[in-house]
């Protein structure tokens, strides 16, 4: 159902339409009756009234017109003022809307029936003209009924307005010209009001159903956004855990082992202990550097500032320069049109793969290839010692689990091909292939 604020707003619009219509009709009557009084020939032909130069002055016959517009104007103005007075609405409560609806429905009928028959002869002084004078205002009242109420109330309104008009005509002392035509017009108006009111009501019902559906969709969207936010936070925690594991955890583990060894040799071999302490300090410095790099990488400033292609190029060239490795780079010449999640996944997997190359592979050469067609494909290879991919939990390879998780969350497939040297055969290195569908 419409709210009280909506009802007040629609009533104000109805009041303004009512007042605007009265002003337009007043201007039209002013022009027509002014033309009648100034052109006798037009009076006899167009208005079909006999020429009577000795008749009463024109102004004395126009008082019903002034009375008609004065009465209608006062009621319409009061109607508009009531919609702006909050204390009236508070006092009437739920009867506020029905009261104003009764006013805009009954007032035009009563005023038109009692005053309009006294109009001087003119183009709208017959039965058809009298019915047309009140039709626009009654149609506005019909729209108010159809907007607020249902089918039964629409039928009651259509019948009640016609019944009120008939009762006033029958019990009024004023003779109504062409009553038969008026009765015929009133019946047609009732049928039209019922049809139009039902149609308006169906449109309003459909609009309210769509509004309710939209509100429910917004509510569901809010729940979905909250759930997505929680899921994003959970994924971000897992991502941070993976980053810290491959930097700080590795360094602290190595440092702990080195210090335990130094403790064991402290009383047996001072030189050995000194060497272990030196290596521990070196491991500590290296771990601190790796942790700073990891924390800086968490911000992904290169990816945000440069885009995926240039970000991969920078991190690959920086890795090759820092560790004196030979790099073969094959990247698209233009920026790719990918979603932020996919770009983040490709960048992070590239970053993890390069960290594994410099920390574990002992490679001399590596390559990075990125292509984009029906699928986006990332291929990273190195000529290092390799490792056993089938091992359940390879030592120091927890980051591989994170790579698989990233690929899966982005809807991609990650394949890792590697084999360590065995039986005198040289290792073929490691090949990492990430494939993500480019379809939205």
Image (spheres, rainbow, N blue to C red):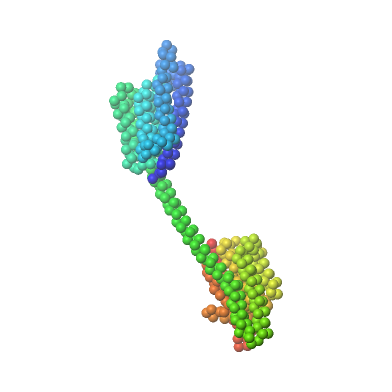
Residue 121 falls in image quadrant: top left
Q: Residue at point 38% right, 35% down?
A: 100
Quadrant into which the C terminus falls: bottom right
Q: Is residue 431 left or right of residue 224?
A: right
Name the residue rendered at 57%, 72% in the picture: 245
Q: Residue furthest top?
A: 54
Q: Position of residue 373 (x, y in %)?
A: 59, 66
Q: Is residue 81 above or below residue 274?
A: above
**Looking at the image, can residue 187 be seen?**
no
Figure quadrant of residue 75: top left
Residue at image coords 60%, 75%: 252
Quarter of the image where the N terminus is located: top left
Q: Position of residue 50 (x, y in %)?
A: 40, 16
193 over 372 or under it: above or below: above
- The image position of residue 284, as x and y in percent, is 64, 75
Residue at image location 48% in from the left, 17% down from the top: 38
């Amino acid at each position: 159902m419409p709210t009280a604020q909506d009802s007040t707003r629609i009533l104000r619009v109805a009041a303004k339409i009512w007042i605007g219509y009265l002003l337009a009709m007043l201007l039209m009557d002013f022009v027509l009756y002014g033309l009648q009084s100034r052109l006798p020939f037009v009076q006899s032909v167009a208005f079909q009234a006999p020429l009577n130069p000795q008749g009463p002055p024109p102004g004395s016959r126009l008082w019903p017109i002034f009375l008609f517009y004065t009465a209608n104007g006062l009621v319409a103005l009061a109607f508009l003022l009531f919609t702006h007075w909050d204390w009236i609405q508070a006092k009437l409560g739920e009867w506020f809307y029905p009261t104003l609806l009764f006013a805009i429905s009954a007032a035009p009928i009563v005023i038109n029936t009692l005053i309009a028959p006294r109009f001087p002869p003119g183009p709208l002084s017959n039965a058809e003209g009298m019915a047309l004078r009140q039709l626009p205002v009654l149609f506005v009242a019909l729209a108010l009924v159809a907007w607020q109420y249902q089918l039964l109330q629409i039928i009651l309104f259509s019948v009640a307005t016609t019944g009120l008009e008939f009762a006033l005509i029958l019990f009024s002392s004023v003779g109504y010209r062409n009553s038969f035509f008026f009765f015929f017009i009133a019946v047609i108006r009732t049928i039209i009001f019922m049809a139009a009111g039902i149609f308006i009501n169906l449109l309003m019902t459909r609009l309210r159903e769509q509004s309710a559906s939209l509100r429910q969709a917004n509510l569901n969207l809010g729940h979905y956004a909250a759930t997505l936010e929680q899921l994003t936070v959970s994924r971000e925690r897992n991502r941070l855990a993976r980053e810290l594991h491959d930097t700080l955890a590795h360094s602290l583990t190595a440092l702990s082992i080195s210090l335990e060894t130094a403790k064991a040799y402290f009383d047996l071999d001072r030189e050995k202990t000194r060497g272990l302490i030196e290596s521990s300090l070196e491991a500590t410095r290296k771990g601190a550097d790796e942790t700073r790099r990891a924390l800086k990488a968490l911000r992904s400033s290169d990816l945000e500032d440069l885009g995926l292609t240039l970000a991969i190029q920078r991190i690959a060239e920086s890795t090759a320069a820092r560790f004196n490795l030979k790099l073969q780079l094959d990247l698209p010449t233009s920026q790719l049109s990918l979603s932020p999640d996919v770009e983040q996944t490709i960048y992070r997997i590239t970053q993890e793969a390069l960290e594994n190359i410099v920390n574990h592979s002992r490679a001399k050469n590596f390559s990075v290839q990125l292509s984009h067609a029906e699928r986006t494909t990332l291929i990273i290879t190195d000529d290092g010692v390799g490792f056993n991919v089938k091992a359940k939990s390879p030592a120091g390879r927890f980051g591989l689990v994170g790579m698989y998780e990233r690929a899966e969350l982005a809807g991609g497939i990650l394949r890792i091909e590697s084999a360590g040297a065995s039986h005198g055969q040289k290792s073929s290195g490691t090949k990492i292939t990430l494939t993500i569908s480019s379809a939205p």
